[in-house]
Image (cartoon, rainbow, N blue to C red):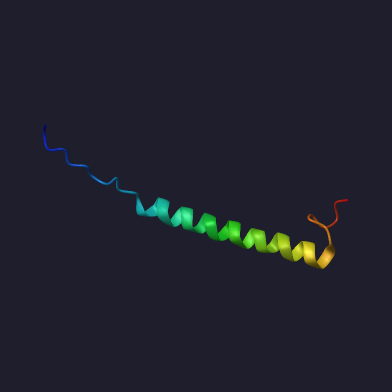
Amino acid sequence: MKNQTTETPRVEEGKVIAERLNGYAAFVGCWALIGAYLTTGQIIPGVV
């Protein structure tokens, strides 16, 4: 058998930052949804 070296794939730093920002935005959106529901009783205020 030959020696097989497995290299870990490198992820671009920009993609890591973009995914982290996307996660933060989703987290803030969830809290905004919860806040809107708690204060108005509707998921989308103004829409019946």
Residue drawn at 17 percent across, 41 percent down = 5
Picture quadrant where residue 24 is located: bottom right
Picture quadrant where residue 40 is located: bottom right
Q: Specify the farthest residue to the right.
A: 48
* In the depicted structure, whether residue 1 falls above or below residue 47: above
Horizontal side of residue 13 vs 30, given as left or right: left
Residue drawn at 78 percent across, 62 percent down = 37
Horizontal side of residue 25 vs 45, given as left or right: left
Q: Position of residue 19 (x, y in %)?
A: 47, 53
Residue drawn at 34 percent across, 49 percent down = 11
Q: Specify the farthest residue to the top.
A: 1
Q: Position of residue 38 (x, y in %)?
A: 79, 66
Observer-nearest of 26 and 2: 2
Count of number-bearing discs: 0
Horizontal side of residue 38 vs 16, given as left or right: right
Which image quarter holds the N terminus?
A: top left
Q: Specify the farthest residue to the front.
A: 1
Q: Position of residue 20 (x, y in %)?
A: 47, 58
